[in-house]
Image: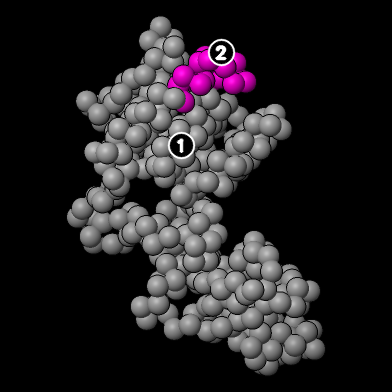
């Protein structure tokens, strides 16, 4: 069975901040960014990312003749024969991207490329375009296990270039609950225990109650150790979609194997994944700054928040004050005991 994947690239300025994306209907989707690039490089990166990520026979749909014609018209054969020179005997641009991509496509032998007219109302091409444009504008990675039209509607609300988004605000049409709380040491340890089971159960009950009031409910969580992972599990149990906002790539690298597996499964189940920083912080100060940016990203979209916190513990006092300042009465404090 052939998988149809739609890819697109975007660049704000060309050269300038860029984004790329690929979309499989009811399947995987992903987007990424570069701070200074060109539209052609983003189109090429999108197609390459799709081929690297997806197994089995692929039909790659792109509105870039630059990408499609390289394979349909076999430009690459002339490039190789001329020692990576084009028909004008000039060095092929973007060879650093083209060379490994061509090698991968030829090694697989199960990739087909199809041109699709851009901005013509094609649902999945438009979705890839929206993902790529959003990645370029926000300079962030996103990905998910199952693409649906609801994701595109969310992107349209968040699009800084969209007039309706500026008029209506980023949360129009979806009600978002942000969930924060203690790490494992304050919850009785890293393993499952009566406290973690109680917190998860109460979060499930809370989300089910809120779902009755807000059918468009979603949860946003940083998916860190402790309450944040419990929040994702509770959302899944309550049939509420959740968005994972990850502070940095590899945040689970030093965690126990079992916890890494649990984290990976929760990432796969997320409606979407937003990564704030592509590299791991090198200092304590950088770590704190990255975590603050992550919290700010979550709170940008939050309509209300739940903070699981022991009132006698001071570690989350600053966060509680920040939440109450931003959301006022829409902050719910839950004692973990």
Which residue is found at the position 45% from the left and 33% from the top? 234
Q: Quadrant of residue 124?
A: bottom left
Name the residue rendered at 35%, 55% in the picture.
154
Which scheme is used to colour this image of the protein? one colour
Residue 335 placement (x, y as % from top left):
39, 14
In reply to whether residue 193 is colored magenta, the answer given is: yes
Q: Is label 1 in a helix, a strand or a loop?
A: helix
Q: Could you say whether the residue bearing mark 2 is in a helix, strand or loop?
A: loop
**Spatial CA span between label 2 and label 1:** 22 Å
In the displayed structure, 309 sits above or below 261; it is: above
Q: Nearer the viewer, residue 157 or 89?
A: 157
Foreground mark, 2 or 1, reads: 1
> Where 253 sits versus 40, above or below?
above
Where does the image place residue 268, in percent across and percent down from the top left? 56, 47
Work out whether 80 lies above or below 33.
below
The residue singled out by tag 2 in the image is 188
Vertical side of 174 occupied by 305: above or below: above
- Which residue in the protein does label 1 denote? 237
Report the span colored magenta: 181-200
Residue 93 is situated, as x and y percent measured from the top left of the image, at: 64, 77
Q: Is residue 54 left or right of residue 115?
A: right
Asked if residue 265 shows in the view, the reply is yes
């Amino acid at each position: 069975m052939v998988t149809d994947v739609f890819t697109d690239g975007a660049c704000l300025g060309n050269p300038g901040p860029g984004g790329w994306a690929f979309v499989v209907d009811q399947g995987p989707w992903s987007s990424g960014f570069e701070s200074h690039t060109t539209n052609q490089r983003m189109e090429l990166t999108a197609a390459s990312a799709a081929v690297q990520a997806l197994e089995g026979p692929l039909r790659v749909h792109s509105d870039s003749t630059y990408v499609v014609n390289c394979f349909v018209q076999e430009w690459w054969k002339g490039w190789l024969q001329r020692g990576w020179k084009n028909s004008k005997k000039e060095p092929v641009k973007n060879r650093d991207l083209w060379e490994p991509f061509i090698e991968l496509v030829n090694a697989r032998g199960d990739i087909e490329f199809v041109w699709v007219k851009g901005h013509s109302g094609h649902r999945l091409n438009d979705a890839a375009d929206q993902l790529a444009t959003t990645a370029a504008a926000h300079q962030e990675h996103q990905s998910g296990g199952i693409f649906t039209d609801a994701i595109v509607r969310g992107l349209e609300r968040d699009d800084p270039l969209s007039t309706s988004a500026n008029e209506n605000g980023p949360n129009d049409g979806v009600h978002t609950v942000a969930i924060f709380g203690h790490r494992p040491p304050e919850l009785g340890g890293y393993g499952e225990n009566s406290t973690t089971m109680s917190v998860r159960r109460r979060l499930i009950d809370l989300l089910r109650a809120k779902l009755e009031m807000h059918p468009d409910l979603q949860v946003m969580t940083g998916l860190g150790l402790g309450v944040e992972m419990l929040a994702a599990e509770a959302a899944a149990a309550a049939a509420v979609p959740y968005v994972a906002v990850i502070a940095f790539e590899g945040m689970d690298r030093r965690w126990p194997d079992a916890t890494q597996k649990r984290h990976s499964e929760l990432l796969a189940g997320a409606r979407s994944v937003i990564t704030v920083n592509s590299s791991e912080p090198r200092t304590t100060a950088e770590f704190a700054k990255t975590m603050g940016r992550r919290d700010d990203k979550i709170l940008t979209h939050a309509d209300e928040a739940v903070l699981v916190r022991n009132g006698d513990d001071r570690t989350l006092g600053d966060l509680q004050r920040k939440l109450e300042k931003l959301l006022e009465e829409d902050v719910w404090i839950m004692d973990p005991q």
